[in-house]
Image (tube, rainbow, N blue to C red):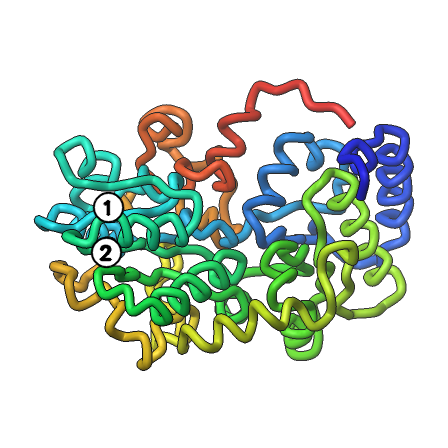
Amino acid sequence: MKFVDEFRDPAKAQALIKRIHAQAKNLPPGRDQPLQIMEVCGGHTHSIFRYGLQALLPDALELVHGPGCPVCVLPMDRVDAAVSLAEQDGIILATFGDAMRVPGSGGSLLQAKARGADIRMVYSPLDALQLARDHPDHTVVFFALGFETTMPATALTLLQAEAENQSNFRVLCQHITIIPTLRALLDMPGLALDAFIGPGHVSAIIGTTPYAFISDDYGKPVVVAGFEPLDILHSLSMLLEQFVDGRCEVENQYQRVVAEGGNTAAQQAMHAAFVPRPRSQWRGLGEIAESGVMLHPRLRRFDAEPLCITSGHSPPDPAATYCGNVLTGRSKPQQCPLFGSACTPENPVGALMVSSEGACAAVYQYRNSDTTA
């Protein structure tokens, strides 16, 4: 890719849209509802609303928003754990900017910072390790979160801390994994999904092979896609072609970034630093077995968990929010009674309003936009 404009070309978009409408007319007869296609990643959700793609599609297709935004599924008890650490004397807590405004049961990290806690926003876990070097009289805790996309950076930072024996560096690990999550979604009763747009960034790390169970065991096609409007339209056309041909496969639209086997160096770093966590709590989704990781036993001296002061119980989101339903594709953000009134990006009640990749934040941002192909 030389220029991003190549993937936003109006003429090519119109050609893809025309092809999608033609393919939709050739779908096997007998369906009384649109194909439910879930875009797993919040980055895709953001692009879909930014470019108004749903409005350009035939009625036979409906895009469903998935749980691929790590900030959106961050449970309250983990926010509470981070706040409890930050408010202890002698601790500096470092994390990414998106995590600062996620509401916990006692408020957000941003509110804790306003109360006087020493909380720093960083762009990389290596920035947190540098804070530990610069402040030997403090314990520096990096609040690590994200899917496999951000996990290698945390892993390499932990391995660097081990090599340096940086004893005042800790990690509060909230890294989660995509494959058990997709399996849990597919096993949910009453959730009618027909196909998936696979996450591009995660797939750059893990490859495309791990998604084979979706087509083999559940009979749902998958196309891993990039994030530009032509990427998404092309992936939808590839999915429709599978339905028209009667095929069910895992295909890779994002070949310029994603390899079948993924990034082996990143995978090796993750395996050296982490082991599966038996169970992980997800905001809006509940517990999912082996859907997260924790520090490898060899690295447990860098684990911040023993320093946390929490109840260990994760309170649910406020009953009025539809976060769980939106994350599983059962509801649209606009159907939530709090959307755009009590819950806004400036005053988020649910986590889906916090991150720019959250479905509610994306709908809110582009709700009045005049988006055209």
The CA distance from mark 1 to mark 2 is 7 Å
Q: Is residue 320 visible?
A: no
Name the quarter where the N terminus is drawn: top right
Q: Is residue 339 left or right of residue 266?
A: left
Location of residue 264 in the rendering, given as x and y in whole percent from the top left corner? 63, 72
Kindly identify the residue that appears in the image at 44 percent across and 52 percent down.
70
| Quarter-of-image position of residue 221 | bottom right
Mark 1, secondary structure of its residue = loop
Tag on residue 77?
2
Q: Where is 269 relative to 127, above or below? A: below
Q: Where is 15 relative to 163, above or below? A: above
**Amino acid type at image mark 1:** Gly
Kindly identify the residue that appears in the image at 69 percent across and 60 percent down.
195
Asked whether the beta carbons under mark 1 and mark 2 sit within 8 Å of each other, the answer is yes
Q: Which residue is mark 1?
A: 104
Label 1 CA crowd tier, 10 Å (few <14, some 14–19, many 20+): many
Q: Nearer the viewer, residue 67 or 218?
A: 67
Name the quarter where the C terminus is drawn: top right
Label 2 CA crowd tier, 10 Å (few <14, some 14–19, many 20+): many
